[in-house]
Amino acid sequence: MTDNPEQTSRWSRIGGTLSKLSTAALWLAGIGLVLMTAFVAWQVFGRYVLNDSPSWTEPGAVMLMSWFIFLGAAVGVRENYHLGFDVLLYVLPDGSKAALRTISDIVVAAFGVGMVWYGSQLVALTWASTLPSLGLPGGFDYLPVVAGGFLIILFSLERMALRFAGVDIDKDVNVDEVPEVALAKEA
């Protein structure tokens, strides 16, 4: 990546920190998914068995869903699983792929900036109201947008920095390079 050992060490620390942040976001998203499932199951049990549906389960499940969607989307940006229009990349020479993927990362980062900017405005506008069934400030509904946008910006910048540092993060898997044993297992 670089000949300077101090700079290499700094990149390793930053990459390690972002990797831990990504892993934590993924774990939180997974826990949120499990909790949302439990909330919905409790609501169904309460409605059909106890004949008394708890009022907090539906808004709680929706809030958890917001968190795991936006955290998972941010991790998808870091792992390059976000949506993209890759058809053009298959017909262009390898040298132009990095430039197009950098443009894609810039667009994704700009989208993250919009999420943080407008999400923050929504949080500020709704903070004074209260979510009646949860007793939380209304701004809690929009915090996942801000957190997800912040992580999307961070992970997009990481991808661009690694690309500019010479790390090949855009290497596509070539079917011809996959060992025959792996192909036989898929068949």
Image: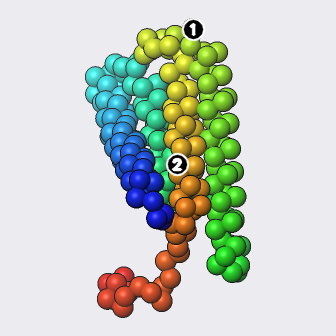
Q: Against 80, is 148 above or below? A: above
How far is disc 1 from disc 2 in space, using C-alphas? Answer: 32 Å
Secondary structure type for disc 2: helix
Q: Against 24, is 158 above or below? A: below
Residue 46, picture quadrant: top left
Q: Amino acid at mark 1?
A: Ala
Label 1 close to label 2 by CB (< 8 Å): no
Q: Quadrant of the C terminus?
A: bottom left
Write the residue at 33% across / 39% down: 31
Dot 1, crowdedness within 10 Å: few (<14), some or many (≥20)? few
Q: Against 166, is 22 above or below? A: above
Q: Against 29, is 104 above or below? A: below
Residue 112 percent across, percent down from the top left: 62, 41
Secondary structure type for disc 1: loop
Dot 2, crowdedness within 10 Å: few (<14), some or many (≥20)? many
Residue 144 percent across, percent down from the top left: 51, 32
Residue 105, picture quadrant: bottom right
- 107 and 33: which is toward the camera: 107
Q: Amino acid at mark 2?
A: Phe
- 148 left or right of 112 in image: left
Residue 169 percent across, percent down from the top left: 51, 66
Q: Which residue is mark 1?
A: 128
- 62 and 113: which is toward the camera: 113
Q: Which residue is mark 2?
A: 155
Numbered tag placed on residue 159 in the rendering = none
Q: Is residue 42 visible?
A: yes
Write the residue at 69% across / 65% down: 100
